[in-house]
Every structure is written in structure tokens, then in C-alpha cells.
Image: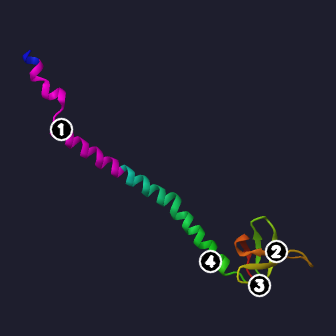
Amino acid sequence: MTNYFANLPMLMGSTEAGAAGGSGQMVTTFVTFGLVILIFYFLIIRPQNKKQKDAKKMIAALKKGDKVVSIGGINGTVVSVKEKTTVVKVDDNTKLEFSKSAISSVVSES
């Protein structure tokens, strides 16, 4: 019977040991979570933001005479630039009006 009561505090768990272990696990969890957020930021979020910024800068710099490619793969030369659209000359007598956001890239500038 004495052995049972001697081991009773150990069986119930000491509050000092449990509290210290729990806070250590909590710190480890927060550090791991923080590292995951940093990895996502530097590998996914930051490059995507840079890509969007470069695309906005390219669209804002469109001017007459630029050779462009649309997101649909249509190649042409910019004839005029309006507020929200651009007119692209595709063939001798063919002109298409695109939304500025439909321009994928500028192949060469005038």
C-alpha cells in the first residue's frame, strides 16, 4: 500500500513539470509556425507581388509602335493607347481592340 501512495504524485502528474513542458511546446509551435509563414512569404507571396508590379509597370508604359503579345497569343503592333484599352494592328487591314490587362508582354519597343 505504501508504494501506491508514494507513486501517486507521479501518476497524477506534477503541475510544475506540466506547466514548463507546455510552455516549451508552445514556443516551439510558434517558432515553427513563424518559419512556415516566412518560407511562404519569400517563396510565394513576394515573387508574385513583384511579378504583378512589373506587369502594371509594363502596361502603364505601353505606347504606339510597341510590338506586343496578348494573353491569347495574338502578336501585333500597338496603334493607339486609350485609358483602359489598346488598339493592336494584327495584319495590314486588321485592328483589334484589347483591354490593357489582356496584353501579356511587350516583345520589342519602338
Residue interval drawn in magenta: 4-31
Q: Assess disc 2: are there few (<14), some (14-19) or many (≥20) residues with their C-alpha within 10 Å of its C-alpha.
A: many
Point out residue 6 in the picture as x, y percentages from the top left corner: 9, 23
In this view, 54 is above or below 26:
below
- Left or right: where 1 falls relative to 53: left
Q: Earlier in the sequence, mark 3 or mark 2?
A: 3
Q: Assess disc 3: are there few (<14), some (14-19) or many (≥20) residues with their C-alpha within 10 Å of its C-alpha.
A: some
Point out residue 9 in the picture as x, y percentages from the top left corner: 13, 29
Q: Nearer the viewer, mark 1 or mark 2?
A: 1
- Residue 23 seen anywhere in this rendered image of the structure: yes
Residue that numbered label 2 is attached to: 76
How far is mark 4 from mark 2, CA to CA? 20 Å
Task: Reply yes or no: does residue 6 show up in magenta.
Answer: yes
Most foreground residue, 67 or 27: 27
Residue type at mark 4 is Lys
Residue that numbered label 3 is attached to: 64
What number is the disc on residue 17? 1
- Left or right: where 66 falls relative to 61: right
Residue that numbered label 4 is attached to: 57
- Residue 103 seen anywhere in this rendered image of the structure: no
